[in-house]
Amino acid sequence: MAEIELFVNRLDSVESVLPYEYTAFDFCQASEGKRPSENLGQVLFGERIEPSPYKFTFNKKETCKLVCTKTYHTEKAEDGQRFCNPGFPIGCYITDKGRAKDACVISSDFHERDTFYIFNHVDIKIYYHVVETGSMGARLVAAKLEPKSFKHTHIDKPDCSGPPMDISNKASGEIKIAYTYSVSFEEDDKIRWASRWDYILESMPHTHIQWFSIMNSLVIVLFLSGMVAMIMLRTLHKDIARYNQMDSTEDAQEEFGWKLVHGDIFRPPRKGMLLSVFLGSGTQILIMTFVTLFFACLGFLSPANRGALMTCAVVLWVLLGTPAGYVAARFYKSFGGEKWKTNVLLTSFLCPGIVFADFFIMNLILWGEGSSAAIPFGTLVAILALWFCISVPLTFIGAYFGFKKNAIEHPVRTNQIPRQIPEQSFYTKPLPGIIMGGILPFGCIFIQLFFILNSIWSHQMYYMFGFLFLVFIILVITCSEATILLCYFHLCAEDYHWQWRSFLTSGFTAVYFLIYAVHYFFSKLQITGTASAILYFGYTMIMVLIFFLFTGTIGFFVCFWFVTKIYSVVKVD
């Protein structure tokens, strides 16, 4: 009969973002068994899969089988409460005020105040279906684990009966705990192999919230689309007709509005080098996100392939150095820049360098804390090798082709003397516009953001890639429309500094993301300890930077297209 091997992953706590290896705690250990190798994504997410002491044979029922007996000394026990969320909990706690924390809510038997309850028994139910090809083979399609707590009457011969295994917070001396498990098998032909992961989703009733989130986002999109359509079809159409008519009637002295700034609209922005570098990195992130989510939607990056999502994202980012170099070089050249070597080096090293430096500092903290999420030195060297040996050369190749091409041709000439910008009203000043611009895109994503943060920090499985891809498309549309609207209003107010403003208007969504992440930390998480807080905000800053580059790039590209389009259809002397 085939032996079934059960593996254990890292241990997580709701009170800390530091995961630990299973072997870091004095639980029952596997006497033998080979540790499976982890892929890059699993290592980056701190997953450490180990062989477990639970071994059983297919279709052989076991009841209350002893795994091992452990003796603990209360004076050596750590007073930090470690509660594990994924997989199954190892224990729970009733506070001195009688409040059930974490898994203690599953049973009314857990009611003693200021007491820990240990889940020292697990019922494992394995579902399988027989392969129809006439062979004796079977496929395991689901496994459900139910944690239980028993104060076994006879530790050497456990019978899995009696009250729960409780340990008072004031207990002293030696405590013996017997760990046991039961296994049962059930044939279930209804579960198809392709949809074997669906049972995990049954316990997560978030779908209705997701649809509410999508509907909320679509309402914002429709509102914005209506406004953009009105501007495009009515106002702009009237403007263009009026401007072109004025030319024919030689009444051009009374020009007003956005046509007035045609001689300055393509004037190179200040800090054009930095903007072009941001656009290059943003393009890299934009394509990476789109392709990763597209693959996730098609099911290539399902929960079955642990770490596949992260591996796919990292590999794509490395391979997308060429578009980053090309876009940065192309725009830098159109801004009139000539320091092409500096441009390529900054595109290759500025944004990735900031992310890696932050990541490395976080890793030092994890090393210091002895966490399983600390990335081994070999993996760090591998990441650096991917960056320096593949991504950087590809960026140089992209930049070579970007600089080789002729500069982007603009539909109107730029005047030698810059036009003076008239006094602006409060709403058309740069800062209010930028702050307003980020509100609507953030409104589209904040519900989805809650689930993503939950999956990262509250150790819940994230599976709704279809929703996420839809929200990604909605975010792109919303960023585009909000930036076009504000760009049009500023041009009508005769302010032609649109390049940085379009990038920052859309990119300001990342600031709202940061504010929400701070709110989430204080209102939703129970994290204690300085190291955990530093890690939370350190990793959040990486996400905020990536999001800033990604949304800012969308805003700039759309505005660039919009400005080129409207000035190409108006007649200019």
Image: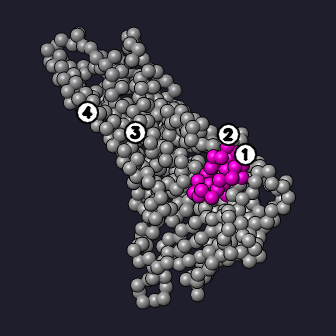
What residue would you read off at disc 2? Answer: 534
Q: Does the magenta stretch include residue 105?
A: yes
Disc 3 and disc 1: Cα gap in Å?
34 Å
Q: From the viewer's perspective, is residue 317 above or below residue 542?
A: below
Q: Nearer the viewer, residue 299 or 415?
A: 299
Q: What element carries label 2?
A: helix
What residue would you read off at disc 1? Answer: 365
- Coordinates of residue 410 in the picture (x, y in percent): 34, 30
For the image, the number of numbered tags is 4
Amino acid at the residue labelled 3: Cys
Q: Residue at x 32, y 25 (%)?
A: 488
Q: Is residue 339 left or right of residue 490?
A: right
Image quarter of the C terminus: top left
Disc 1 and disc 2: Cα gap in Å?
9 Å
Q: Is residue 521 magenta?
A: no
Q: What element carries label 4?
A: helix
Disc 4 and disc 3: Cα gap in Å?
16 Å
Bounds of the magenta segment: 91-115
- Coordinates of residue 248 in the picture (x, y in percent): 14, 18
What residue would you read off at disc 3? Answer: 444
Amino acid at the residue labelled 4: Gly
* Nearer-N-terminus badge (3/1): 1
Please tell me the numbered disc located at residue 226. 4
Amino acid at the residue labelled 1: Ile
Q: Which of 237 and 165 is in front in this view?
A: 165
Amino acid at the residue labelled 2: Ile
Q: How crowded is mark 3: few (under 14 residues within 10 Å), some or many (20 or more)?
A: many
